[in-house]
Image (cartoon, grey):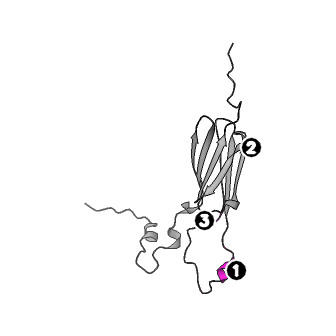
Amino acid sequence: MANVTRYNPFDELFNEFGKGFWVKPLAFPAGTEMSIKLDVKEDDKSYTVHADIPGVKKEDIQVDVDGNVVSVRAETRKETETEKDAKKGEKVLYSERSYGMVSRSFSLPAEVDEKAVKAEYKDGVLNLVLPKKANGGGKRISVS
């Protein structure tokens, strides 16, 4: 009986270990872009959001609240060529760090009191306290 082997042309990209450079640049997946990961918790008075946004300065983070919709936007900038010129003779072999803007929006079950929102960014984590709006609990309608 003959053995059948499946040919995968992409295997060649990953099997170059040990031949000089450890990985071909084309072998990196496209999934290295920035993203915002969220945890949202609720208690009787407020929502608490923990958003992982590493590598961003707090000045480059923008939080918008409109009713019950919360939007978080962050931007990270790449070094300019003049900053790189300070290290003459160096060249980048490959870079996995992402540069650009990332945003995330989500809806909450109740409206948020925009005036009492608190935001703190520390160690790559944005912490938001979003107090629920008084009288924002909705109204029950009786069916006749």
Q: Nearer the viewer, mark 1 or mark 3?
A: 1
Q: Is residue 20 left or right of residue 144?
A: left
Sequence order check, earlier mark of 1 and 3: 1
- Numbered mark located on residue 115 in the image: 2
Q: Residue furthest left?
A: 1
Q: Is residue 117 above or below residue 30?
A: above
* Residue 62 percent across, percent down from the top left: 70, 54
Residue 127, x across and y down, in percent: 61, 51
Label 2, residues with CA under 10 Å away: few <14, some 14-19, many ≥20: few
Asked where in the image residue 84 lies, by quadrant, the reply is bottom right
Residue 70 position by quadrant: top right
Q: Which residues are magenta?
A: 78-100
- Is 87 within the magenta? yes
Amino acid type at circle 2 is Lys
> Which numbered disc, 3 or 2, marks the residue that appears first in the sequence?
3
Look at discs 1 and 2 and give the one toward the viewer. 2
Residue in the image at 65% along x and 83% along y: 86
Q: Nearer the viewer, residue 57 or 11?
A: 57
Image quadrant occupied by the N terminus: bottom left
Picture coordinates of residue 133, whole percent (x, y): 70, 36
Q: CA distance from mark 1 to mark 3?
A: 19 Å
Q: Are marks 3 and 2 in contact (CB under 8 Å)?
A: no
- Residue 82: which disc? 1
117 vs 32, nearest the viewer:
117
View extreme (top): residue: 144
Gap in Å between the C-alphas at discs 3 and 2? 33 Å
Instruction: Report the front residue among 113 and 93.
Output: 113
Q: Does 92 appear above or below 49?
A: below
What residue would you read off at disc 3? 98
Q: Amino acid at mark 1?
A: Thr
